[in-house]
Amino acid sequence: MVGMSFLVLVVSLLCCKKDFNVVAGGLKSGAEASVVMVIGVCVFFFMSHSWMFFFFFFELALIPTLWLILTWGYQPERLQAGMFMMMYTSCASMPLMIILLWMVSSVGSDKFLLVKLLGGSFTLLGSVNSFCWFFLVLGFLVKLPVYLFHSWLPKAHVEAPLSGSMLLAGVLLKLGGFGLCRVLWLVEINVSPFVSFILVSSVWGGLLCSCFCFCQGDLKALVAYSSVGHMSLCLCGVFSFFSCGWSGVKIMMFCHGLCSPMLFCLVAVLYELSHSRSVGLNKGLLTVIPSFAFFWCCFCMVNMGFPVSLNFISEVVLISSSKGISFYLLPVFGLMSFVTGGYCFYMYGAVSHGSLSSDLVISNCLSERHMYGGVFCLVILMLSFPGLDFFFYVFNFSLMVHSSVQMSFSLNISTSLWNKG
C-alpha cells in the first residue's frame, strides 16, 4: 500500500498539470501541497503500529481531500459533495473511535503487535453483542465503500478536480480495506448474522451498481460507480479469512489504485478536449484522437479483468476464496464479471466508435505527460504478474514471523516460570 501510494503520487503530479497551474491571488495554488499532504497522511496510516494513531490518520486524510474538493472543484455542487463525504465518514467513525478507546482501556495498550503477541487475538469483544461488532467495522465499510454506504462516493468524484478524483480512487478507498484487514487480524470474531447481511448486501449491491453503470450519461460517474463492484469483491475476500483471499484483496486494491485513477485522468483529458463528459456527445474519437482511444481501450480492458493483468488475477483469487464462504455467491460473481465486461465494452465503444458529433469541437490532442502516465501504469498492471510472490507471500511471511515470535515469547515465559517454580 505504501508503494501504491507513491505510485499514485507520481501519476497525480504528472497528469494534474491543469490544477497545479491555477493562480489565485497572484500566487500559485497549493494543490501540489494538498496532494502531497494526502499521500503523506495515508503513508503514515499504512505504517502505523498503534491503533489510535491508525484512527487519527484515518480521519486526518479527509481534511486535505475536502480542501481539494472545495477549492479546486469545477461546479457549485462541490459544497454539497464535501458535506456528504464528511458526514458519512465522520458519523460512521464515531462508534469506531469509542470502541477503540474501550479496547485501549481494556488491555492497557494500543499497539497492534504487542496485543497480538500477548493474547493471540483480542477476544475481549467476544462478550459484547454483535451490534458492537457491526459498529466496529462500520467506519471501514463507509470508507471502502460498499453498497448502502456508497452515496457519498459518486458525488465526491463528480465534483472533485482531477487530482482529488485520482486520490479518492487510488488511495483513500484503500483505507477501508486495509483497516478491515488490520482490525480483523487483531479482533477475531465470528458474528454470522451481521457477516451474512454485509456480504449479501455488498455482493448484490455491487451487481446493481455495475448494472447502473449502463444508465450513466456522465463518464466520471460511470467510473465512480464501477469502483463499488470491485470493492465488494475485496470485502468478500476479507471476510473469507483465508490467506489467499487476503492476498487477493491486496492485489485488487493495488491494481484498482492504478487503473481507476488513470480512467479518471482520461475522462479529464476528454473534458479538456471536447469540454464535455457526456457519453452522448463524445463519439467517434477513434478517427480524431487515436492515441486517446488506444489508452482508453487498454484501461477499459484492465478494468474488466483482461488476462494477464493484475486485475484478472485478483478476481480469480477472490472468487476462488469466496466460495469458502458460500457456493451461492458464485453465480452472483459470475453475473458481476459478465456485467463488468459489458459496461467496459460500452464505455469503450460509446466513446471511440460512432459518428463524430457536430457539436463536438476538439481543441488539441493527447499531451505527452498523459501518455507517460498511461504507459507507466500499463507496464505495472500488465507486466507485474511474475512478481506475484510479493503479494502472496509477504502477508504469510509476516504471519509466520509473528507466530514464531509469539511462540518464543511464550516459551521464554514458561521457562522462567518453571525455573522459579
Image: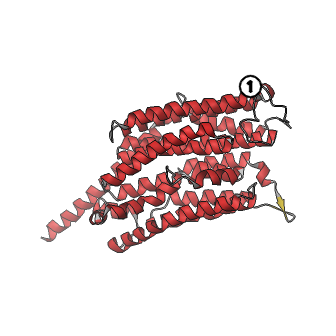
Q: Quadrant of residue 189?
A: bottom left
The percent position of residue 11, horizontal first and vertical second, equals 67, 45
Left or right: where 86 falls relative to 135:
right
**Residue drawn at 33 percent across, 36 percent down:** 327
**Residue drawn at 74 percent across, 32 percent down:** 292
**Residue drawn at 63 percent across, 48 percent down:** 8
Q: How many marks?
A: 1
Residue 242 to residue 123: above or below: above
> Could one spot residue 174 in this view of the protein?
yes
Neighbor class of circle 1 (other Cα within 10 Å; few <14, some 14-19, many 20+) is some
Left or right: where 360 falls relative to 63:
right
Q: Amino acid at mark 1?
A: Gly
Q: Secondary structure at mark 1?
A: loop
> Could one spot residue 61 in this view of the protein?
no
The percent position of residue 392, horizontal first and vertical second, equals 42, 40
The percent position of residue 221, horizontal first and vertical second, equals 64, 45
Residue 387 to residue 36: above or below: above
- Quarter of the image with the C terminus is bottom left
Left or right: where 134 falls relative to 230:
left
Q: Quadrant of residue 227?
A: top right
The percent position of residue 159, horizontal first and vertical second, equals 69, 53
Mark 1 highlights which residue?
A: 354
Q: Nearer the viewer, residue 137 or 334?
A: 334
Q: Quadrant of residue 96?
A: bottom left
